[in-house]
Structure formats: C-alpha cells, structure tokens
Amino acid sequence: MIIGLLLNIFFLFCFPNLSLFVVLLTSL
C-alpha cells in the first residue's frame, strides 16, 4: 500500500495524465 502511494505521488509529479491510471492499479 505504501509503495503504491509513493508510486502515485511519483507519477502525479512526472505524469499527471497517468495519475488516475496509477490510482486504479493501487486500488486493486
């Protein structure tokens, strides 16, 4: 869970358009 959150923050700053995709992956 924590790793997914860090990845979400990483993609949020690097790839804002893919942040939603990362959220969907971490929610599974």
Image (cartoon, rainbow, N blue to C red):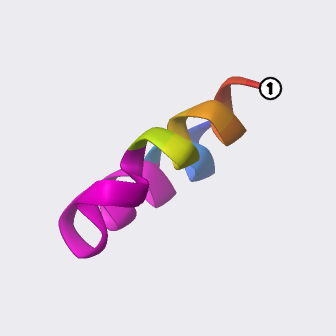
Check the picture and name the quadrant holding the C terminus.
top right
Numbered circles on residues, count: 1
What span is in magenta?
Answer: 6-19
Secondary structure state at the residue bearing disc 1: loop
Check the picture and name the quadrant holding the N terminus.
top right
Magenta residues: mostly which secondary structure?
helix
Location of residue 11 (image quadrant): bottom left
Q: Which residue: 44% across, 39% down?
A: 20
Q: Which residue: 34% across, 66% down?
A: 10
Residue 23 placement, left or right of 20? right
x and y percentages locating residue 4 in the rendered image: 59, 47
Most distant residue in the left direction? 13
Q: Is residue 11 above or below residue 3?
A: below
Is residue 12 highlighted in magenta?
yes
x and y percentages locating residue 13 in the rendered image: 19, 66
Q: Is residue 19 above or below residue 14?
A: above
Q: Is residue 22 above or below residue 7?
A: above
* Crowd rating for badge 1 (residues with CA inside 10 Å; few <14, some 14–19, many 20+): few
x and y percentages locating residue 26 in the rendered image: 66, 36
In front of the other: 24 or 6 = 24
What residue is disc 1 on?
28
Most distant residue in the bottom direction? 14
Disc 1 residue type (three-letter): Leu
Q: Which residue: 62% across, 32% down?
A: 24
In front of the other: 8 or 15 = 15
Most distant residue in the right direction? 28
